[in-house]
Image (tube, grey):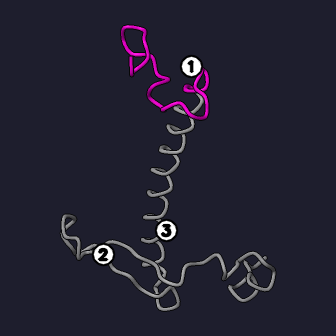
Amino acid sequence: MKAPNIPQCLSLGVLNLDQLPAVIGYRDPQADPEDADGFILKPLAEATVDELRAHVELVSAELAIATRRYQQLRLLYEIALLQGATAETSVFAAMPSANGSGAEG
C-alpha cells in the first residue's frame, strides 16, 4: 500500500493547515553557534525537507525543555500543597528549610 500524499492527508484530516506554522526557523549549520544571526526563518511553503527536519529537531528540543520545566513546576506545586500551603501562601514560604522551619521563618 502506498502512503497518502500531502493533499490526501489534508482531505483525510490527518494534516491540519491551521496547526502548522506559517514560518519555520532553524540554526544555520554553517553559522557559528554563538552567533545570534545564525538563525534562519523561512516560510513553510518555501522550506526544503531538510529545513523542515532541522525545524522539527529544534521544536523537539524545545518540547523536551518545556516538559522538564512543567514537571518541575508541577512537583513544586504538589510539594507546596503537601506542606500545607494555601492559595495565598508564597510558594517558597511553604518549603521547609534545612533546619525544619519555613523559608520565611
Magenta: predominant secondary structure element?
loop
To which quarter of the image does residue 38 belong?
A: bottom left
Of discs 3 and 1, which sits in the foreground?
1
Q: Residues within 10 Å of mark 2 (few under 14, many from 20)?
A: few
Q: Position of residue 84 (x, y in %)?
A: 60, 20
Of callouts 3 and 2, which one flags the residue occurring earlier in the amino acid sequence?
Answer: 2
What residue did someone put label 3 on?
A: 56
Q: Is residue 4 magenta?
A: no
To which quarter of the image does residue 77 belong?
A: top right
What residue did someone put label 1 on?
A: 83
Query: Amino acid under label 1?
Result: Gln
Q: Is residue 72 left or right of residue 38?
A: right
Q: Residue at x 21, y 73 (%)?
A: 31
- What span is colored magenta in the figure? 79-105
Of callouts 2 and 1, which one flags the residue occurring earlier in the amino acid sequence?
Answer: 2
Of discs 3 and 2, which sits in the foreground?
2
Q: Residue 39 shows which numbered tag?
A: 2
Query: Amino acid under label 2?
Result: Phe
